Image (cartoon, rainbow, N blue to C red):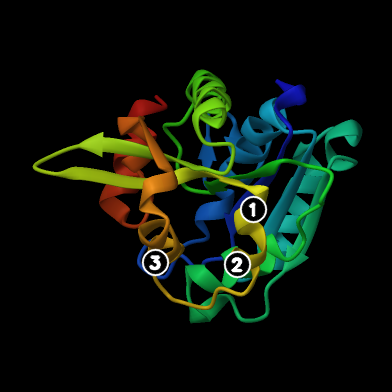
Amino acid sequence: MKHSGLQGLLLAAGASTRLGQPKQIVIYQGLSLITRQTRLLLKQCQYVTIVLGANADLCRRTLEAELLDHELAAIELIENQNWATGLGSSIAFGAAHFDRTYRGILLLLVDQWQLTDQHLRHFVKHWHACAYVKPSNICIASMQQEKLVTGPPVIFSEQFIDELSQFNASDGAKSLIKRYSEQVFDYPIPQAFTDLDTAEQLQVLRASDS
């Protein structure tokens, strides 16, 4: 859906301290996670900005080795020197590189390995449908547990980008989403809440890939 009107934003700056190895280059389905997630975004977005931090050179080399030339031409690699201060820093840094020709940002994390093309395609369609109700909106993935849990992927309409670019909190964009709760629409994607932070989670990933 290259006509989605969205710019992709992939957050891949973390040090993977608990995992003990760079999660960005963990192999799943024959590709590093950073390449896999980049391609997921390129299926929906004409242009993707990737925020690097820890292991930046390794991530660059991996993408250059795995992506095709036309894919490399559609991405921008930016390095957040303040990545260690928290996710909010990388969100702000990425939002500051927003191209105003797009209608919003589709934000994804590098370790959301259970997400598929179909998930993102339906998610973007949901955002378009919500835009008819509230043109300025935030669309966020959700999962029902004892209470509703929300998180990336997230689509921020262009009206929120300036505020995102000034963000410096360590809690990602939670405070902004709470502030504009009446403009937030959730969409159920339970798979979005499987990530990769520990050795045990890595075992689950590898078992599913066998």
C-beta proximity under 8 Å, tags 2 and 3: no
Q: Which residue is mark 2?
A: 163
Say if residue 141 shows up in the picture.
Answer: yes
Q: Residues within 10 Å of mark 2 (few under 14, many from 20)?
A: few
Q: Residues within 10 Å of mark 3 (few under 14, many from 20)?
A: few
Q: CA distance from mark 3 to mark 1?
A: 16 Å
Residue drawn at 50 percent across, 29 percent down: 133
Looking at the rendering, in which quadrant would you find the C terminus? Answer: top left
Q: Residue furthest left?
A: 146
Q: In the rendered view, would you say 123 is above or below 185?
A: above
Q: Amino acid at mark 2?
A: Glu
Q: Which residue is mark 1?
A: 159
Residue drawn at 67 percent across, 28 percent down: 44
Residue drawn at 49 percent across, 24 percent down: 126
Q: Which residue is mark 3?
A: 175
Under circle 2, the secondary element is helix
C-beta proximity under 8 Å, tags 3 and 1: no
